[in-house]
Every structure is written in structure tokens, then in C-alpha cells.
Amino acid sequence: MKNKLTAAIAALAIFAAACGGSGGDEDTAVDSTATDPSATVTETTTTPTTTSEVAASTTDAPTSTSEATTSTTVSPASLPWRQVIAEDCECSDGSEYSYWVREGDPEKVMLFFDGGGACFTAETCDPNGAPTYSVEADDDPNSADAGVFDLDNPDNPVRDWTMVFMPYCTGDVHIGTRAGVDYGDGVVINHTGYLNATKGFEEVVNNYGSAEQVLVTGSSAGGVPVPLFAGLVADAMPEADVMGLPDASGGYPSTPFLNASIGGLWGTDGAVPAWSTTEGVTAAEFGIPDFYRYAGNEFPQIRWARFDHAYDGVQASFSALAGLEDSSVKAVLDINEDLTEDAGIDLPVYVAPGTDHTIMGAGYFYDTEVEGVRFVDWLTDFIAGEPIDDVVCTDCQPPS
């Protein structure tokens, strides 16, 4: 899985039409062990819609989820990931979009959005630049072994969970709905990340709609849509304990001019949910930190948490690229937390020192400790429903 970069910068009715499908069970399963996922469809199948179907259709897999979660001889790491081609969905370059599902406990589901570079000009969208334009071989989570994807680590609070992993390839932080955006100089980009991301939502709701817990999370660009999709899951699964935990995306301000200009390019107005809290909301009012209050006030049962590094170098660099001069990530983190909590949303935060970027899939996931509290213990308590407090570095080591 890539260590990708991020950027600053729909109503539910659009889901049935998104990417030409109506849910995970209409998509195409492929061989997830192939080296080139974008070109290795081995057969067209019907995606299993129940845990028992998935287990029975996978070579060497346990014959039921209960065996997978209770047997002393089955390691969570042995549970396979299956790749699903999302029919008619596409990446920035027009190539097909796919995602992965790992069948674990059907009562506990993690929906994870991956990160990658964002773009909004001919220069930043240059195919030779940083953004990722297609689903590639190293997106395959079968090779991931760090953070929440370290399935052998007994400290991993989600190691036995069902996991839905959504790659990123559209340069729009998973909130775009516009195809064929022409930036000139031959640079044409499909900013259809939100339409692709709805496939993960559909996978969870259609195939795990009776789950007791759903953790919606993601890193970098993948952290941006977390509040929106946590809200959509809470709406569709009102009995579930829904948690939203964005990673490394809390340091971007809501600036109406940038929200409107970049959002206009990406078509973010098509991603505005049909909630009472978003009635009449325009792209200018659809900024990254605004998502918490829209979702949180619409669905007060959602539990929230957030992780960032105080001087995250990637967030700082993309804020500068978007024209936000003299912005301090730590200062914006504090402002955004205050805005969220002033709106009545409880948002515990964990802020680690330094300039690193992301933690949920990082090697230091289990080693990070701030003010005597390990991040993994804080996250474990959060998932378990235990009270958690803000954990914020006192010596945050700002860059010189």
C-alpha cells in the first residue's frame, strides 16, 4: 500500500446511479493475488453477499465467520482480501476502479479510505506529478502489514474485523463528482472520487447491514470524507455503533473562496448529502472542517475522534499550494476542534509532535506515545466506548 500524499482542498439518491451500479453484489470479483490489479480480471462472478458465501467461495478460507473469529488455529492474518471491480467506476485517467474486502467478524466492520495526492490546476494535475491516477499493484492490502493492517499484532483493536479498503485515484480527496475536467495542456482529469467511494458505503450497508459496530476511518486524503460517510452509514444503519476517525486531515481551514473554486472544479456540490443540516449548502460552505458539524448534528449518535501530527509537513505543504500563506497546522487544528465542539460535537483529539504524516497504516502506530498515553491504547478505548480525553503534545517540536 502506498504512503501517499494528501491535499487541502449527494444525496443518497445518487448512490443507485453512482458508477452505474446499485451495490457491491453487482460488481466483479477478481484475483487479488495478481501483480497488476487494473488488468487481471480472471472471471466475472457475483460478489458474495453474505459472510458464509464469501467464506465458502475462498480457497483455504474458514468455512464460516464464526470459525474465523473463534478458532485458535486460524490467524486473522490468514483471512484473505478479495478484490472487487466497481463496474463503470473510473479513476482520473479513465482506468477501472476497484476496492478490496477482507471477510472477518460481520458484526464489526472497518471502512477505510486511502490517501493520495490532490490536484486542481494543470500543473498539480500533470500525470507526471504526485497524484495517483489509477489503482495500482501496491494498493493491494494483501501486502500491508502496519498499523490497523498488522493482522498478527494482538494489540490491533480491529484485527478480527471485516475490512473494506477503498483505494484513491481521482485527485479530489474522495469528494468529487465531475468527470472530464479539462485543465488545458492536454490534462483532462476525472474527479469522480465521491462516486467511487459510495461503492464502499454500499458494500457495508448491503452486505453488513446488521453490523453492531462500524468504524469509518482513513488517512491523509482518505481522512477528509470520513465525517460524510460516517453520517451516511449512521443514516442507513441506525442501530449500529458508528464511529468516525479521520487521520491526518484536521489541519485544513474552511475558506469559502477555496471551497468554491476548488470545489467547483471537483463538483463537490454533488457530494452534499440530503440532510436537514445541509439544506441549501453550497460548495463555498462545504469545507473540510464543516463536515463534522453537518454529520454530527444530523446524527448525534456518531462517536468521533481525530488524529494529527502538530506540524504535519504534508498538510502544511498542500495548504501552501492552495494559497494559504502563513498557516500553522497546529493553529488550524485547534481552531477546527473549537469550531466543531462549539457546534455541540464532542471531538476528542490526539495530537502527536513533529512533522510526520498519518498513523493508521504507519509503522509507528503501536509505538507512538504522547503525555504517557499510547495512541493504540487511546484508539482501543475509543472503539470500546470507553471515555477518552484529548491527548495533545506539550512540546510539539515546531519546525525551525
Image (cartoon, rainbow, N blue to C red):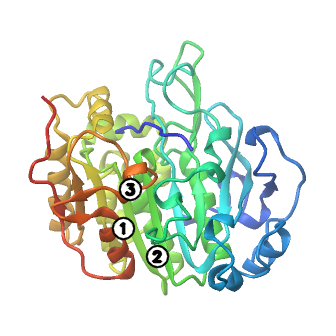
Q: Which residue occupies 33% across, 48% down?
A: 249
Q: Which is closer to the viewer, label 2 or label 3?
A: 3
Percent across and percent down for residue 341 are: 18, 67
Position of residue 311 relative to residue 388, above or below, is: above
Q: Which residue occupies 76% across, 76% down?
A: 62
* 3D distance between C-alphas at marks 2 and 1: 9 Å
Disc number placed over residue 295 in the picture, else none: 1
Can residue 14 be seen from the camera position used here?
no
Question: Mark 2 near mark 1, Cβ–Cβ under 8 Å?
Answer: yes
Q: Quadrant of residue 320?
A: top left
Can residue 152 be seen from the camera position used here?
yes
- Give the SS element for disc 1: helix
Mark 2 is surrounded, within 10 Å at the Cα level, by few (under 14), some (14 to 19) or many (20 or more) other residues, namely many
| Kind of residue at badge 3 | Phe
Residue occupied by mark 2: 234
| Kind of residue at badge 1 | Ala
- Give the SS element for disc 3: helix
- Give the SS element for disc 2: helix
Position of residue 263 relative to residue 306, above or below, is: above
| Kind of residue at badge 2 | Ala
Question: Mark 2 near mark 3, Cβ–Cβ under 8 Å?
Answer: no
Report the side of 103 relative to 126 (left or right): right
